[in-house]
Amino acid sequence: GRSGWDQPIADEAGIAMVKSRFSSLDVRAMVNSIRPEAVGCKLSNVYDVNSKVYILKLARRNFKCFLLLESGVRFHLTGYQRDKNAVPSMYTMKLRKHIRTRRLTEVRQIGTDRAVEFTFGRGEGAFHLILELYVTGNLILTDHEYTILALLRGNNDQNSKVGLRQTYPLESATGLLVA
């Protein structure tokens, strides 16, 4: 992709390696890099590649792109159409139900954390898709008041601090860096 994240980077020995995890600075840089292209696009569909990787197909007049979200690892725009599951997961169906056809109105880093918030729609009709890039990661859909509607990893997980119908703890997100 244009962002360079699909391209291997060479280490000191010249051996190609793909960057594995985003740091907080990587998150800030990527948010700033995708914002001009992605904000203002309508979400035309959501696909799952596997249980951790989701593709958001974004489009506006004469432009389309794919936003890859990998829970716990990375996010970037890509022009590369990956193989997707023939049958969408329950989680993908929930995302489609709530945010398909909505406009991406904002992309922001949550505090200085390794978490990104994608806002679809405005006001009381808005939804927030929050990608967490720390520990095992998560992908969380909330309504305009940050009440959790769907999450990739449930609260039966010891590391998870969130559950369905709870309010997403935006203010404590920066404290979640402690593994």
Image: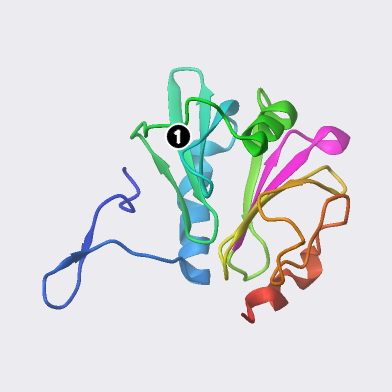
- Which residue is at 35% across, 34% downward? 79
Question: What residue appears at the point 63 percent right and 57 percent down from the top-left corner?
Answer: 138
The foreground one among 111 and 19 is 19
Magenta span dominant secondary structure: strand
Residue that protrudes farthest toward the bottom in the picture: 178
- At x 78%, y 35%, the residue is 122
Residue 24 belongs to magenta span: no
Q: Position of residue 118 (x, y in %)?
A: 64, 46
The total of numbered circles placed on residues is 1
Q: Which residue is mark 1?
A: 66
Q: Position of residue 4 (x, y in %)?
A: 30, 52
Could you tell me which secondary element the residue under label 1 belongs to? strand
State the residue in front, 125 or 35: 125
Image: 129 above or below 38: below
Quadrant location of the C terminus? bottom right
| Vertical order, 99 against 128 (above or below) | above
Query: Is 122 a magenta residue?
Result: yes
Q: Residue furthest top?
A: 61
Residue 57 point in image, percent of width and height: 51, 29
Instruction: Examine the image and state in which quarter residue 106 appears.
Output: top right
Segment colored magenta: 115-129
Q: Is 149 on the left-hand or right-hand side of 40?
A: right
Corner quadrant of residue 8: bottom left
Judging depth in this view, the residue of 52 and 125 nearest the camera is 52
Q: Position of residue 127 (x, y in %)?
A: 76, 39
Above or below residue 52? Residue 90 is above
Q: Which residue is the extreme one toward the left?
A: 14
- Answer few, some or many: residues within 10 Å of disc 1's Cα (few below 14, many 20 plus, some between 14 and 19): many
